[in-house]
Each structure stands twice: as structure tokens, then as C-alpha cells.
Image (cartoon, coloured by chain):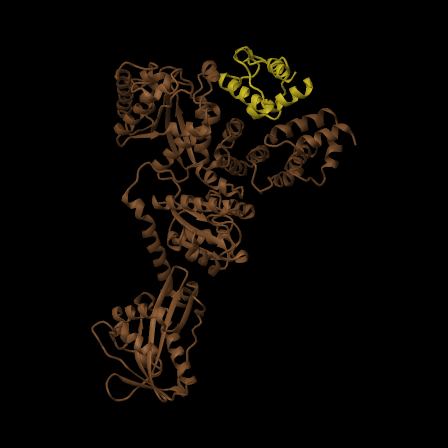
Chain colours: A brown, B yellow
Amino acid sequence: MNPILEIIRSLVENAGTDLRRAVSLAAAMAIESGSQQEILRELESPTNLGSRWLRAALTERAHGAGAAKPLWEEVVDQNGCEIPDVMLHCARMLARSGDINGAAAMIRIALHNSREYDLYIRAETVARKCRTGFGSKRRVKVALLSSSTTSLLRGVLELQFLRDGLEAEFYEPPFGTYFQELLRTDSGLKFFAPDYTVLLLNWRDLGLSGIAANGAESERAIERVKEMWQAAMELPSGKIIQTTFTPPQFDANYELSSLMAHGKCRTIRSINEALYEARGDRVILVDCERIAAAWNGKWEEPLLWSSAKVYPAPAVLPTLGEHIASCVRTELGLARKLLILDLDNTLWGGVVGEDGLNGIQLGPPSAIGERYQEFQQYLKDLKERGVLLALASKNNREDAMEVLLRHPSAVLRTDDFVSMKVNWEDKVTNIRKIASELRLGLDSIVFLDDNPAERSAVRRELPEVIVPELSGEPAESIAALECGLYFQAVRLTDEDRTRNASYFASARQAEMSKSVGNVEDYLAELSMRIDCGAVDAETSIRVTQLINKTNQFNLTTPRYSHEEVEARMKSPQFWCRWYRLKDRFADHGLIGVLIAQVTGKHWNVDAWLMSCRVIGRGVESFMFRDLVQFARESGADRITARYIPTSKNVLVAQLLPQFGFAETGKTGDFVLDVSSAKLSECKFLREAKVA
Amino acid sequence: MVMSTLLQLNIIFQEVFDDPQLVVEPGTSSSDLADWDSVAQVKLVLAIEEVFGIRLSSDELSSIHTVGDFMTAVARYKS
């Protein structure tokens, strides 16, 4: 084989992480050596991402965008994840062919899935050309006041705002004039009247000594920042977004910088603390110490500070921009509200329908299981502060519910979800249904799924929904979800904490109101499972409890002690049964009791009662059928029963006639001829072991 | 090597300025391209550092004015 082909091939196949660079190099080499056609023949059945990428790139050069388009669509990584660089390239092609909307949609996805500054640089110009394609509905005016160069940050923010449907107008005062701009009454800033004033300062502005003699420097610095806030607040309606200070990476005082009361590092922390205390309603602080910690020494680039006054390092800008943009989003009410989750390989490892309750990976001792459990805890924490969780999963409902109800390591339980669409319908339909049930817009939804095909379908059909890429590696799920800061909040109210409960109730009500229109559909959707058995030592306590506290659905309202129940349970003269019910919302546990006294061929109903929580589900029909079947088997010819009215049990006044019992003439006494009893079908109650 | 460096630089320039028709030569300077301002300069440097996997020095940062200067800088690291 031609040695150059060999080189080019091994270049893209062994490129590792920096694939874009390798492909660009390989393409340049192919063109330079004039071996494009030969390489393309070589790459007819590409084996990995690098060769698929190269094939698309060379095809585009040789045969044009049209021929390359289907090839570009195949360029996804081994986990099926979209490559932001490739999406950006496709956006460029679409933009050139005049499809501005298509290009904007691609750029949006690329920007949602990348925090690489390199990508932002390359996206800037093409995004501006496609500006109208983003369909921005709102305008926002942002002033960037900083002791550093703001134009790089501005480029990043502009892209992030465009992506989020915001047309931003920026004001950047001349370098080095931010303080005067704030204080002067006739400045460009005052004329601009920003909605948001971003104040990006750094430790150099504080003028701190290595170890100061006293707290004077610190107090002066705090006063200066407050003075700026004061001035910014004189602007008509604006809010201030202030970044906190980070200690310099290098400090000749080493640990002393924090150990000494007035060491630089400690002083910077105390300044931040003072700013948090003093901030009030109109100032939002972005915690840069936390961001810097995650960037591990890469937060600043001394060289670029000296040559171009760039702060922080360009690589950090997309992350910092995301923090700022997310604060603006949440202030405008554009933060996402609802997270819709898949189950298998998203909330636990494995497929419950195949691996079973005990076969899936969730919780220790499996390392992967621990990652999934930690992810569930993270989601639970989101829920606790007001983010709504819902499920859209292709699964047998029973299998999925079993995990949520019974798995010992599951953190998320059925009542953590405001809606659960666990069925075999497509995800797009289910997401639409959840949105309309909760009366939320699609633009308040984030959807998380490990399956690239599902993600792609949702992105295509529901572009308003944000669909983060998941690598399938549970250790990366939290990062993939958090990096977009979709659920940013800058204050926490009691309402946030209880939001889930109220949505849960309203979702249930929506279900209920549907039942007015169509009871059968409602009952069918509940996926009820009923279980029954003879009262035994284990169930007798709960049976006693139910007998004594049930008022509404209680035919004779007996009140028996535990001993009395046990006596009946053990006596051959009594037939004692319990009933359990479970549905997709909950396991209701033991909810029904039916006891009959048997005297030869005569059965007499001694107790018939049911918990009010499951009234209207048709459980009584099931109980009636159970009774008649046993009576028949024992050779009984008649069943008698009595309705004893109380102030609360009018609900069951018609129960006996409804099942064909005839009045005996004595008020409240009924009789049923066992042979002619009609047993109704209980089609919505599946008989199955509940526990 | 020189050729492929120029080819790659050309791709970077095309991307940063979003102009697929843009052709740069070693002699192309910041005064030839209207969009090549100080912000673009930083972006070009960052993109070039990324693509070639290099880190330019303070000296180079302040002395780069033409495509040829970039080529020289890249060559220094690649030799």
C-alpha cells in the first residue's frame, strides 16, 4: 500500500482525544499528496470515528456538501454521542446553502454540548450570520464592566444568549474606565441603561499586601465594591451580576497566606464573605472560587493577562459565561423546571426487564452501582429544591415500579416523580403528554436518556427540549447534567421546596379529571394489581387496625380486638380474607377485609370493609367475587348480609342490592341465592402477588 | 511540512473569520484583513495553539503580525 495512505490512516485511527486536529492534518496531507481519491476508496467502510470523519471531510472537498451530508450524519462517537465540532461544521454547510434555521439548530446543539473555548471561537462568526435562525423572542441589555478585556467573554455570552433565545445587546466601556463609567452621571453606561451589569474584577484590583498589618486594606476593598454597586443601582432597573474574587494561584507566603488573619488568601475569602452578606436583592454573586477550584490551576493564564489583559483564562470563559447566562435566564424566568428521565442505564445499570430486580446495578457493592446511586441522590437533591422530576421510559410498568418501590438501594421512589410514563410508547409522545399534564412548556424541559437514538429523535421532534449528551458512563452523568446549569436558581423559597408535592397533586387531579370523561381509561391507566389471602398471624394486626378505623366503606362497622380477630382467624366457623392493592402511584398495602361466618350451607357476612383510599377502583367487585367463589366451592346455598347504617357509611347503603342481594323484608337484612349470583368481570384488577 | 502548516493555518483563518474562500499566504498581514484586530489575534493564537498542540511565548505573541510569523513560530516548536 502507498505509504502516505498508511500514515494518513493510522493518523486518524489512533488520534486519541484531539481528533479534530488529526483529521484536519490528515486532510491537508491527503490534498497535498494528491491522494484524495485513493484515500476515499480506502475509507469506503470506515471502522471508527476518525476514519468516518476523514471520509466526510474529503468527500465534501471532492464532491461537495450535498454528497457529504449523509456521511457527516454518521460521524458520531463510539457511544453514539454527537460531536460538537462536527455539528458546527454541518451548521456551516447549512448556512452556506441558505438554511439559516437548520444551521442555527445545529449550532444550538453544539453549544449545549460543549464548553470548549476553541469551539466558541469558531462558532462566533457563523452564529452571527445565522442570527435570525435562532428566533430570539426577547432582548436583553448587558453591560460588561471589568478591569480586564471583556471582548472574549462578550463573544461567548453572545453565543450563549443566542442559544437560549435571547438577543443580547452589549455595552463595553473603553478599557480601564469601568469605575468612572459607573460614577459619572453622563457616561455611556448610564445612557445604555443595562438590564444586567456584570462586574468582573480580579485579585489585582484589590491591591492587597502579602500579609497586611491590619484589616484596613480589606475594608477599603469591600467599600470600593459596595460603592460600585451603589452606583450601578442608580441605573433605572438593572441588576448586578458580580463575580467573586479568587486568590492568585501563586503566593510567596504559601500556607501563611491563609493562616495569617490578614494574609492575602484569607483576606480575599473574607472580602467575598462580606460581599455575600451585603448583597441585597439586586446583586447576584457568581462563586468564582468554586469554578476556579474545578479548573485546577488553569483559571488564570499569566501570559495572556500580560499580553492582552485576559482574565480569567480563555478556556474557562464558556463555563464562566454559562454561570452568568444562567443567572440572567433564571431572573427572566427562563430556567428549566422539569427533568424527564429514562430508567434503564440512566438511573440504574442494566435493563430491569431482563436482569430483574436483583440483577440491575444500583448501590454498593458494585462500583458502577454506587455511581448510579450517587446520581439518584443528586437528582433527589435537585427535586428537594424545586426541580420537578418525571419518567419517560420504555419498560413494563411493573418491572420499573418494582425497582422504585422495592429496591433497597434506590434513592428515588415513586413519589419523587410528578409523572411516570413507563410504557412502550415513543418518548416524544410521552414527553408531550407530561408537558400538557403539568401545563408546562416544552421549553422548560430537560430530557436525559442514555440511548443516542432516543436523544436524537427528541432533539429533532422537540427542539425546545434540551437533551444533554450522556456517554453511558454513570460517573459522567452528573457532570453532563450540571455543566449547562439548566436549573439555576438564585433564591430559594418555601414554595420551591413544596413544588413537587403540589405538582404531584395536580398531576393526579389531571388523571382524576380524565376519569370523569372516561372512567375505564383512568382505571386501565392505573395498572392495578390486587392480591388476596386468608388472614394469618402476620396480617391479623393490620386487619384489626383496618376494622377499627374504617368508617365509610364498612357494611356493619364491627369493632374487634386483636384477640377477637385471631379467634375468628383460627375458627373453622369463619372465613377471613384480606386484600392488597398496588397501582402505578403507590403500593396501598392491605386495604380490604371480608369475614363470613359459616354455618353449614349458610354463609353470613360478618365484616366487609375497605380503606377509603381505594374507593372507586372496583375492589369491592373483586371481593364479592372472591366471597361467592369460596361459598360455592364449600357447597353453600345462600349468603346473608346486613347493612347497619351509621353516620358515615352511606356509601355502602346500595352495596348489597348492587350485587344482587335481595331484601328479606326485615330492614337492612339481605340474602343472596349462591347459585344465581352474577359475578361481574374485574378487568382492571390484575390478580397478582403484590408483596 | 511548510506547505501543510500553511494549509492548516489557512483552515484556521477560514474558521475564525468564517470565510471558506479566504486564502492566506505567508505575507498576509493584519493590515490585509479588516477583521484581524486584537481580539481576532487572541483567537487566532488560541486556535493555533490548540491545533498544533503548542504554547507560544511572550516574545512571539507580541511579534506576530503576519501568517508567515505564525509559520515561523509553529516551525520552531515542530523542529
Q: Position of residue A335 (x, y in %)?
A: 38, 40
Q: Viewer-proximal residue, A122 or A139?
A: A122
Q: Position of residue A67 (x, y in %)?
A: 67, 38
The quadrant of the image that shows the C terminus of chain A is bottom left
**Residue A528 occupies quadrant:** bottom left
The answer to whether residue A616 is visible is no
**Residue A561 occupies quadrant:** bottom left
Q: Position of residue A79 (x, y in %)?
A: 58, 42
Residue at screen point 35% across, 38% down: A489
Q: Is residue A445 above or below residue A406?
A: above
Residue at screen point 29% across, 45% down: A495
Q: Is residue A109 above or below residue A558?
A: above
Q: How many marks?
A: 0
Q: Is residue A51 above or below residue A512?
A: above
**Residue B12 occupies quadrant:** top right
Q: Viewer-proximal residue, A593 or B23?
A: A593
> In this image, A307 relative to A619: left or right?
right
> In this image, A69 relative to A227: left or right?
right
> In this image, A671 relative to A111: left or right?
left
Q: Position of residue A126 (x, y in %)?
A: 53, 29
List the single residue furthest toward the right.
A1
The quadrant of the image that shows the N terminus of chain A is top right
The answer to whether residue A645 is visible is yes
